[in-house]
Image (cartoon, grey):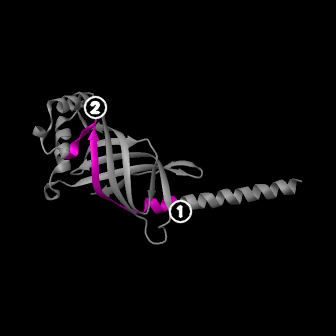
Amino acid sequence: MTITYKKYALLLALVLFGFACSTKNDVEAFKDADYSLKSIDEVRVNGINLLDKKGAEDFSFGEAATLFNAFSSNDLNAKSTLALNVDLGEGNEDRTMTVTQLKWQLLVDNQQAVSGIVQEPVQLKNGLNTITVTTPLKLVEENGNPDLNSLLRLTTLLNSDKEKRPPITLQIKPTIQTSVGPFELPAFINIKQ
């Protein structure tokens, strides 16, 4: 009878080891993948579409008041639709991954401008991924207050010509659902636009 239990325990251990190896390979494939942000198709901050704003004069009084109130308390919320290309490389094309949480930050000219966290699950696969995410925005603070210049710079930056933009880097740090539970990557992954 104890031999039968040992056989079942060994079989269970082998199955768990197989899942763990598969999970490790999935994590490695996505960690080593090439990421590129192809487009930003929607950016709404507190319900205001920022993609049709080129400068401060494009905001109505109501939109400016809404953003200023949210900005003053650093309580901005964004909804964005992104086209993210994931190149997993040869032999990994059929892998998928569920990201259960995604920490992110946007660097402008190699300095952090805004950061946030996506709490809803996102499914990633090899190729072009269209992702709609909702996230709170945390602007960089100066002397304990959100920096208004950062907000205005970010708003106009979204619609400026690519040739005139300073270098923009999106960094992500996903928490991935694995067969043995959630796993957060130890470092940010750079995604350059």
Q: What residue lies at 44% left-to-right and 43% top-to-bottom?
A: 120
> Circle 2 sits on which residue?
74
Residue nearest the observer in this picture, 138 or 40: 40
Q: Where residue 76 appears, x then y in whole percent? A: 29, 34
Number of marks present in the image shown: 2
Position of residue 36 in the picture relative to residue 109 (left or right): right
> Circle 1 sits on which residue?
25
Say if the magenta span includes residue 186: no
Residues at marks 1 and 2, CA–CA distance in whole angstroms: 39 Å
Packing grade of label 2 (10 A; few <14, some 14-19, many >=20) is some
In primary-sequence order, the first of circles 1 and 2 is 1
Residue nearest the observer in this picture, 185 or 56: 56
Say if the magenta span includes residue 35: yes
Residue type at the position of mark 2? Asn
* Residues shaded magenta: 26-51
Q: What residue lies at 15% left-to-right and 51% top-to-bottom?
A: 160
Q: Is residue 15 above or below residue 145?
A: below
- Residue furthest out toward the bottom: 90
Report helix, strand or loop for mark 1: helix
Q: Is residue 44 above or below residue 193?
A: above
Position of residue 22 in the picture relative to residue 63 (left or right): right
Packing grade of label 1 (10 A; few <14, some 14-19, many >=20) is some
Position of residue 158 in the picture relative to residue 178 (left or right): left
Q: Where residue 122 appears, x then y in whole percent? A: 44, 49
Q: Where residue 29 appears, x then y in whole percent? A: 47, 63
Q: What residue lies at 37% left-to-right and 45% top-to-bottom?
A: 133
| Image quadrant in which you'd find residue 55 | top left
Report helix, strand or loop for mark 2: loop
- Image quadrant holding the C terminus, namely bottom left
Residue type at the position of mark 1? Asn
